[in-house]
Image: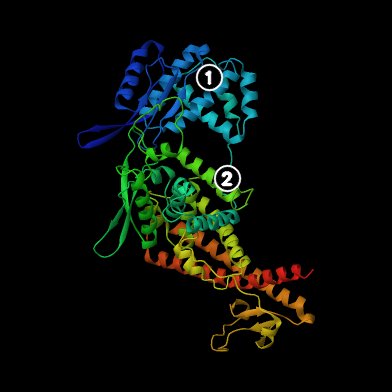
Amino acid sequence: MKVKRIIDSGSTRIEVIEKIQFDPSKLDYYVDLFQSLRKSGYLIAEEFNSIFWYIKDEIEASPQKLAFDIEVYRELNLAFKAYTLIIRMSGVSKKTIAQNINLLKKIILESNAFRNIEAFEVYLHSLTKTTAYTTALALRSFFEFYPLPESDSCLQKLSMLEHPKNSNRSLPPFNQVFEFDDIINEFTKNEPEASPQKQYFYIVELWWYLTNIVPMRPNEFLRMRKNCIEYRNDGSYWMEIPRSKSHSQTLEKEIWYQWIQINYETVNIVNQYIENLNQHISDSLYLFPIELYDKFVKACNSKRIYTDVKFLNTTQLNDRIDRFYQEIVEQRYGVYGHRKIRGGDTRHFAIINMFLQGYNMLSISRMAGQTRIESPENYYSHMGRLVETYTYRLASLRMKEVNVEKQLSAGFFGLRRKVYDIGKIYDEEELIHMRDVEFGKCKDPHFPNNCIEDCRHCPNYIFFPPVNQFNDGITWLEDQSKAIAQKMNQQVKKMEIIFGKSTELNAEEVQNELKQASRNLQHYMDQRINIDMQLLENFIHTEASR
């Protein structure tokens, strides 16, 4: 197995590629590696022969459990331990190690340690394409480290597996996301500060408001320090975000901190939380200390495996989100059947939102704390769907005032989203005194000073056709709605093309082109909302009169 390592030589860092294979006669070498990792705190276990090991890093708070429990295949079990130590030293993440070990154990047990090739093949084909392919990658790596007599036969079967198609990250339906956003805003506004649910779900609120604005992975959000807000002499507000390299060829994970400018509303949200936190835990370095979790969750009978955990982990965050869905979304608001948003989804919402605002790839990458945005097409594919859902949702709420550009610049989600009034229904007496326009009425008292080219795009327009022109009027609205939808789609496609040009250069003309496309998109969204409001309002009234 070829392993990359980084060796520090004075002021120079040298990348070395070594070919390593397992040799059972050199077990002492692996025991020494084990002791080294154990001493440095990266591995927790009583001894090399222990069944359970726990590996940790600087990124996630809690250690990852590994079970070496296939003693019926003793030499394979030893090889697993040696393999774990080698790939851990080369920088493979603890999550990937645990996944690979579990996949390898399953196929070993199913195939009698690779001796039953037919059972080996049957098991592979019982897996999903993605799991089979991941298992194949783990097996190829392991066979390079520990060649077996059966390796060639197994590799031949692996070569026949289909490569799974690259699929975009699956996000919850956006109409459910917007509904969740409404509920969490309502909860923040109305829940008493001292209530147990407010205390328990404070972390969910902060996760939603911060990570929908600033692209952050859950482990970065959870690692935030309590003193993360800075006020500068020019009156600006800044927030410190912990960042970590997603890939590394060394055991140590580099943690660095990035300062991002934020607005007063965000500062206020964080400060309210810190004030509340200090009433319970005043000496914490972190925003989400582990003591906060222990305060609300009864400790298990077994003692904590690793007592130096300082902050909550991703699993604990997702547990809180699940509880919020159960106790608030479902039990309090009666909204069931939602596909739950996960801790890492909001980073994608934030990046998609920045795309739609016209930020170029380089700016988005910097904001996300990365040298580049991985697979930008994953984000492009969601843009059109989000825009379509967003315009429909605002129209369906019959907003009296709709300013899409302000909504976009503030972020699609979170407290900064403006609360709109629901437009009142006009009775016929009022309509009689309004000015007649095509298929309807104009409610603007300053007509024609504020007139625009097409009444269908005007917020002062009320669709109210004569009975004998009703069907023609509906067709007139629907045709324009479809035409604008096509223009919106064209702008999204145009932005995708421009993003491709802006991955390497931050050229001023590219940035200007992006901003203009973003403004055009927002303009068309605004127009379509006005038209669809008329269609939906008419539909509601028609259904109500039946």
- How was this image coloured? rainbow
The residue at 47%/19% (across/down) is 68
User: SS class of the residue under badge 1?
Assistant: helix
Please name whichever residue, 20 or 207, is drawn nearer the observer in this view of the structure: 207
Q: Is residue 165 or residue 244 the one in the foreground?
A: 244
Instruction: Answer yes or no: is residue 2 visible.
Output: no
In-image side of 170 versus 270 (left or right) = right
Q: Tell me if residue 225 comes above or below residue 111 in the rendering.
A: below
At label 1, which amino acid type do we have?
Answer: Ser
| Left or right relative to 55: residue 486 | right
Position of 78 relative to 358 (above/below): above
Q: Quadrant of the N terminus?
A: top left
Residue 156 makes an appearance in the image: yes
Say which mark, if any, is on residue 151: 1
Residue 248, image x, y percentages: 36, 37
Quarter of the rendering containing residue 55:
top left
Neighbour tally class for label 2: few under 14, some 14-19, many 20 plus, Cα within 10 Å:
some
User: Looking at this view, is 264 or 78 the one in front?
Assistant: 264
Q: Secondary structure at mark 2?
A: helix
Q: Nearer the viewer, mark 2 or mark 1?
A: 2
The percent coordinates of residue 475 (x first, y second) are: 73, 74
Q: Which quadrant would residue 132 be assigned to in this image?
A: top right
Question: As drawn, is 190 to the left or to the right of 457?
Answer: left
Residue at the location (39% across, 61% down)?
265
Marker disc for residue 326? 2
| Spot occupied by residue 166 in the image (x, y as percentages of width and height) | 56, 43
| Residue in the picture at 48% in, 12% down | 74
